[in-house]
Image: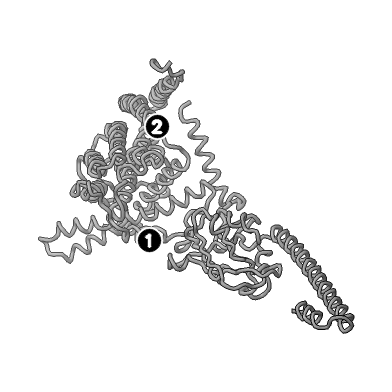
Amino acid sequence: MFETIDQIFVLIKHVLLGYVPGMAKPLVSAILSVVPVIIAFPLLFAITTVLERKGLGRMQNRYGPNRTGWFGILQPMADGIKSLTKEDIVPKTADQLVHFLAPVVMVIASFLVYAVLPIGRNMVIADLNAGVLFFFAIGSMVELSVFMAGWSSHSKYSLLGAMRAIAQMISYEMPLVLASVAVIMAAGSLSTVSIVNMQSGYTGIWPHWYLFTPWGITGFIIFMIAATAESNRCPFDMPEGESEIIAGYFIEYSGFKFALFFLAEYLGMFATSAMAITLFLGGWAAPFSFLTWIPSYIWFFGKLLAIIFMFIWVRGTLPRLRMDQLMNFAWKFMLPLSLINIIGAGIWHFMPAGFMRWGVVSLLIVVSCVLLSRGLRRNKWFHVRTYRFAS
Amino acid sequence: MLGEGIVKGLAETARNFFGSYVNKERLTTVQFPEERLPQIEATRDFPFLVYDGADPEPGLRCVACQICEKECPPKCIYIVKSADKKPDATGKQQFYPAQFDIDISVCMSCQICVEVCPFDAIKMDVEFEMSSTDRFGGLLLDKYKLAKSNEYYNKIHPTEADAVDAALAEERAKAKLAAEAKAKKDAEAAAAKAAAAAAAPAPVPVETPAPAAATATGETK
């Protein structure tokens, strides 16, 4: 019974494939795998927007949207209809073709990465043996489309926003990848499915997640900070800083194209969160051995929602960083710490299991974290600015 | 330690998040169309014309002096003076506005028209839900739409209206006294004249009747 519920989507797909002639099978199989993902994640996007607005509202002691539908549930519908019926304005001096392509490329790139994310047991569109590599390679396409949007709009604000976005995304891609390298080392595989399988065992009631190792928790935190920066969310929303450059790279977009950028941004956030779940939180595995009767996809989406809530919480708490703070943090703290984390993962691998390796690896990471944060702080000195020619 | 402030901040937002569900005091939002806050007495948005009594046509205090029209900074008032006269709030014969239009899409709610009006005829309204599907005609208010009773004015701005009413009552009393005095004086003058006229004919038949009759007819005219 449990097996059936857990594998219900896989079984339905097999039943449906039974009616299809042999030649069309690969194509129909691909469509049957892709369509649910294309439906489920935009739906999650719609739910997230309303949850985010309500959550942020509550953090600021407001109600948030509560007019459309029951408690504002239908708000994303209203927003969607609004953006669909709005006029699509293209600037006269814009590069028409690139201006049109930028949101399309962004959405395609955001959807492509879902190909390697295991949503449940046996539920992955393509089990590539270089899945993690594929994820980060396709994820970099987002930067391309951001710059396409910023450059083709022929507006100084969108160009500034695009420049900021590129600088930030490239800087934070490195800690993002290096944090996952530790997991790849431990799992000995680039395939997302086998990484999840490596973590699916239990000791007593406790799972074998990589989160529960000193290098795993450090890697997870680094990964999540970098993921926040990658998806251009607060406090790293420099590329779209409303108070400085209005909306950043998508300022010249309106109507449905703007909605596509919005969608792509959230899809990117879900994808990196899902990757963090896959790498550090055991993917679809249950957090305790006695909870394994709950279907795997429910665990996956539960974890995803928990991470989304963390994103919303952080957004409601922190103000926007300055560009130099952002860059200093990326290059002087995150990058060295993720490199040390890899060394820590290596030490963990070669030391015999026990409290000894816990102590050694934790000490290494904590000491380097303290030293690096002191290094960050040392730059915070102020001085009276002197003007050579004015005085 | 790095991240200490972030943890503090996260705790604060979490406290607000859960607190807003537990403690209704935290939520200061007023759900507008259903719930409304009482308006403060100094609320003002667009001007209206005050009339006394029940009927706005004779009761309008405005005497079409056009001071407000001249003073209005965005020039949103348009007045046409009447040809004939009617008694104003104090009973004096005055002109009245044949046409009085205010374009509230132009009005900037500066209250200068109210400040300059010597007759307390134009005051500021508190009505703000005035949206219209016709942005030209719907927002151009004529004198019938602008006219609102003194009772309404007393309701929306009680303190101010009391002062205005007291001043007007004083003026009316003064005007009444003046009118009475004048009537008395007129009556006295008429009586004196009548007396003079009555006294004059007495010696007439004795001396020269013809010129006396002429003066008497001249005086009565």
Q: State the image quarter where residue B94 is shown.
A: bottom right
Residue type at mark 1: give it: Met
Query: How much space separates mark 1 and mark 2, taking CA atoms?
Result: 35 Å
* Front residue of this view, candidates A146 and A335: A146
Residue visible at 53% across and 55% down? B72
Residue A55: x percent and y percent?
A: 47, 49
Q: Earlier in the sequence, mark 1 or mark 2?
A: 1
Q: Is residue B122 left or right of residue A66?
A: right
Image quarter hosting the N terminus of chain A: bottom left
Q: Chain of mark 2?
A: A
* Front residue of this view, candidates B23 and A223: B23
Residue visible at 72% across and 63% down? B168
Residue A44: x percent and y percent?
A: 36, 54
Query: Is residue A376 positioned above or below B197 on the image?
Result: above
Q: Is residue A201 visible?
A: no
Label 2's element? loop
Q: Is residue B103 visible?
A: yes
- The residue beneath circle 1 is A77
In this rendering, the label closer to the viewer, 1 or 2: 2
Q: Quick check: marks 1 and 2 in contact, CB under 8 Å?
A: no
Residue A348: x percent and y percent?
A: 34, 27
